[in-house]
Image (spheres, rainbow, N blue to C red):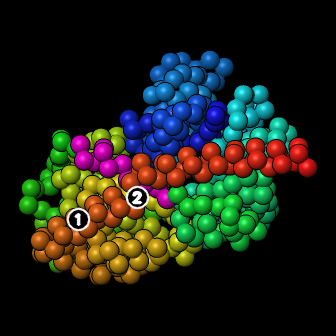
């Protein structure tokens, strides 16, 4: 089977961002399928292609994946208008491929929501199988965050969401809330499955070059956040906790923020003004080096802004990296991950907007290292039992294959009726 796979922010493990699409594509190839990955140029990623762009496009084979990369540089520090323009430009280029390439199934994954546009064209103009993967609920999330308020834009996004869901033969949601959100739009549950983000157990198991940023002593507690520094991430909560720890004189607890994003400069400015010596900002690092950092960390920070739409409607990469590395997790908002952390005893779930509880949890972790180690063991067990990327990738491939098989069966039935 030939799959035309659209992910604007695709990256190999050499990048400093999520590699779900890379791993899923590799599993499809291992199962005997051919994959063409269509993407843009993402600031935190690495497509594996290094040659020059010709007519704003370059192409090559990376680890068995045919990659088509458009010269559409994207960064999460871009403004709303710049991001919107790049999303629409990528969708336009993608439609051209959807209408001309040879393939059996078109697969598209968000974000952005415009990722569904080539699938709509493929379904209705070429009669191709279309599977749509939803990583975030749009326009619900930007509306809830107040990022987008224009009623015309929200209406247009709502229509695009509906059209993408209704055009797709099958859908994948990355969290329970996303599956429910798709179903609320009238999609039958038998057309939706859940395949959450997964744990790259091999990458973290092979981590050998353990390291800590300069200034963090071997016996200090090091809590790590590895991800985007954006509005949605609500990282002021980490600075609030750091300030509380400073007031308590805890110079043995360090908060390390690794990544980039729209809010990073403002966060660094605030930390400087408050003289938060216990906070370190670090540039993004590739997956292997991140594994080395986590091998020497004590706790992973799963932080999001206190927005109810996030509680069950997200599946953050960083959480799965933490537990793959055997790190206990400190989570600062309610929802399915907080419930799982509590039920499995693999970290701390504190109330949103409560810097005192956040600091208390960090002190608890620093003072009860044996208990913390046991939490880490349980975190790793959770990763292996429920979120092993290899097992989830097989579920993913089976879902795509069955979509094509079901259509072939239906076609055959119609021919004989």
Tag 1 or tag 2, which sits nearer the N-term?
1
Label 2 Cα neighbours within 10 Å, binned few <14 / some 14-19 / many ≥20: many
Pick the front one: 252 or 36 = 36
Res 379 visible: yes
Task: Check disc 2 and report the residue beneath it.
Answer: 387
Farthest residue, direction right: 417
State the image quarter where residue 148 is shown: bottom right
Q: In this view, does 295 lie to the left or right of 229?
A: left
Name the mark on residue 330: none
Q: Indicate the position of residue 413 as horizontal and vertical percent values.
A: 83, 48
> Which residue is pictured at 51% across the width and 37% down the height?
31
Q: Indicate the position of residue 380 as horizontal and vertical percent values.
A: 28, 61
Q: In this view, does 105 lie to the left or right of 10?
A: right
Task: Tell me whether circle 2 and circle 1 mark residues in contact (CB < 8 Å).
Answer: no
Q: Give the range drawn in magenta.
A: 196-206
State the image quarter where residue 71 is shown: top right
> Which residue is pictured at 78% across the width and 57% down the height?
166
Farthest residue, direction front: 416
> Which residue is pictured at 47% across the width and 76% down the height?
335
Circle 2 or circle 1, nearest the eye: 2
Q: Is residue 170 above or below residue 5?
A: below
Q: Is residue 282 left or right of residue 159?
A: left
Task: Check disc 1 and report the residue beneath it.
Answer: 376
Disc 2 is placed on an element classified as: loop
Pick the front one: 185 or 144 = 185
Pick the front one: 321 or 45 = 321
Q: Indicate the position of residue 140 as horizontal and vertical percent values.
A: 65, 67
Q: Distance between the residues labelled 2 and 1?
A: 15 Å
């Amino acid at each position: 089977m030939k799959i035309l796979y659209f992910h604007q922010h695709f990256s190999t493990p050499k990048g400093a961002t999520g590699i779900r699409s890379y791993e899923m594509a590799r599993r499809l190839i291992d199962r005997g399928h051919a994959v063409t990955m269509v993407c843009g140029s993402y600031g935190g990623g690495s497509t594996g292609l290094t040659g020059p762009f010709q007519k704003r496009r370059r192409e090559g084979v990376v680890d068995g994946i045919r990659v088509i990369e458009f010269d559409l540089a994207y960064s999460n520090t871009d403004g709303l208008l710049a991001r919107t323009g790049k999303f629409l430009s990528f969708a336009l280029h993608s439609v051209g491929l959807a209408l001309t390439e040879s393939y059996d199934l078109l697969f598209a994954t968000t974000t952005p929501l415009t990722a569904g546009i080539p699938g709509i064209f493929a379904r209705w103009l070429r009669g191709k199988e279309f599977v749509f993967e939803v990583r975030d609920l749009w326009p619900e999330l930007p509306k809830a965050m107040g990022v987008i308020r224009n009623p015309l834009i929200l209406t247009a996004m709502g229509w695009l969401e509906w059209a993408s869901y209704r055009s797709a033969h099958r859908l994948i949601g990355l969290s329970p809330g996303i599956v429910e959100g798709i179903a609320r739009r009238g999609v039958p549950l038998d057309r939706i499955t859940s395949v959450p983000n997964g744990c790259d157990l091999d990458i973290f198991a092979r981590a050998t070059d353990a390291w800590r940023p300069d200034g963090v002593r071997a016996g200090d507690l090091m809590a790590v956040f590895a991800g985007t520094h954006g509005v949605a991430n609500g990282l002021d909560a980490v600075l609030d906790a750091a300030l509380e720890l400073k007031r308590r004189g805890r110079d043995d607890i360090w908060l390390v923020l690794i990544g980039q994003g729209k809010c990073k400069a403002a966060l660094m400015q605030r930390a400087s003004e408050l003289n938060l010596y216990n906070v370190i900002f670090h540039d993004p690092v590739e997956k292997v080096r991140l594994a080395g950092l986590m091998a020497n960390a004590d706790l992973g920070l799963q932080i999001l802004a206190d927005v109810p739409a996030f509680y069950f409607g997200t599946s953050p990469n960083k959480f799965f990296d933490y537990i793959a590395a055997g790190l206990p997790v400190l989570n600062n908002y309610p929802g399915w991950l907080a419930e799982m952390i509590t039920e499995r005893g693999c970290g701390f779930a504190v109330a949103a907007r409560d810097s005192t509880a956040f600091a208390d949890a960090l002190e608890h972790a620093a003072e009860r290292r044996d208990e913390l180690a046991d939490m880490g063991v349980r975190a790793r067990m959770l990763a292996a039992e429920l979120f092993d990327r290899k097992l989830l990738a097989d579920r993913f491939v089976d879902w795509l294959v069955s979509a094509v098989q079901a259509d072939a069966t239906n076609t055959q039935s119609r021919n004989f009726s």
